[in-house]
Structures are given as structure tokens and as C-alpha cells.
Amino acid sequence: MAFVDAAGLADVVSGPGPITVLAIDDASWYSLAATFPAGVTLETYILPENIGLLQDILYYHIIDGSHPIASFVSGNLTTLNGDTVSVEVSDAGISFNDAYIIEPDYMFDNGIVHVIESVLLPPGDPFPAK
């Protein structure tokens, strides 16, 4: 939630919706951090000069409309950052750019949350300068 607050997305998450949030647990953020270039940490993303990158990543985890797990079909969905995420429905489960839903269908006031197993990175260079 610290990233959501730092990026100023609380209004989006608590707004009128409906939205679908592909939520990431703390362990996934720390796994991503292990791949960062030298000198870049999770805290680097909340520096004022990097908030735009953080917002881009977080908006890539939000889809307009309420999408329960049973509604997904294979294809592409446009996220709130304007990029598309690939959806794959298979016997193994439902994935977004190869990140599987591990906890589906948490309802909240303006939409639905699915917890996914890893951070989705939008196209481009997601790493901030040191």
C-alpha cells in the first residue's frame, strides 16, 4: 500500500470504478528487486523523480471494469496505463503476461482484486536511474 500512496493512486483504487486490480504481494516486489541494476532499490521508486515510473507500473496492474475470474478469456486487455496485458486461460489457470492468479475474486466497493504471483512490468525500461 505504500507504493499506492506514494504514487497517488489511492483515489483511483477508492474511486467510483468499477476496476479490476491485479494485486502483488510483498514477496513479489522483493523478488523483482533482486533483478534490479546495482544501486537501484524498491525505495528508489518513491523518489520524486521516479514517481512516473512507479505510476506506470501500478497502472499496468489495473483494468477498467469489474472482471471476476470466470469472465476472463484468452486475449489482450488494455490497462489504465494504456498498454495491453496478455491474458491466457488454460488448464494451469489464468495468467497475465505469465503471472498467474493465485488468489482470485476479492470484492471491494468499486471492483475486484485478483492477487497475482509476480509484478507485471509494462513495455519499456521499468528501472529508474540510481
Image: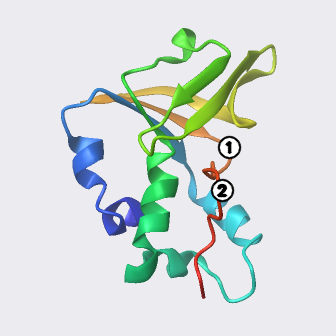
Residue topped by disc 1: 117
When the figure is inspected, residue 34 is found, relative to residue 1, above or below; the finding is: below
When the figure is inspected, residue 8 is found, relative to residue 13, above or below; the finding is: below
Q: Which residue is drawn at 57% across and 75% down?
A: 42
**Mark number, residue 21:** none
Labels 1 and 2 touching (C-beta < 8 A): yes
Residue 104 visible to the viewer: yes
Query: Residue flagged by tag 1: what amino acid is it?
Result: Glu
Reading the chain from its start, which is encountered first: label 1 or label 2? 2
When the figure is inspected, residue 130 is found, relative to residue 116, above or below; the finding is: below
Specify few, some or many for label 1: CA neighbours under 10 Å numbering under 14, 14-19, or 20 or more: many
In the rendered image, which quarter contains the C terminus? Answer: bottom right
Please tell me which residue lies in front, 2 or 62.
Answer: 62
Residue topped by disc 2: 28
Query: Residue flagged by tag 2: what amino acid is it?
Result: Ser
Residue 49 spot, x, y in % from top left: 42, 81
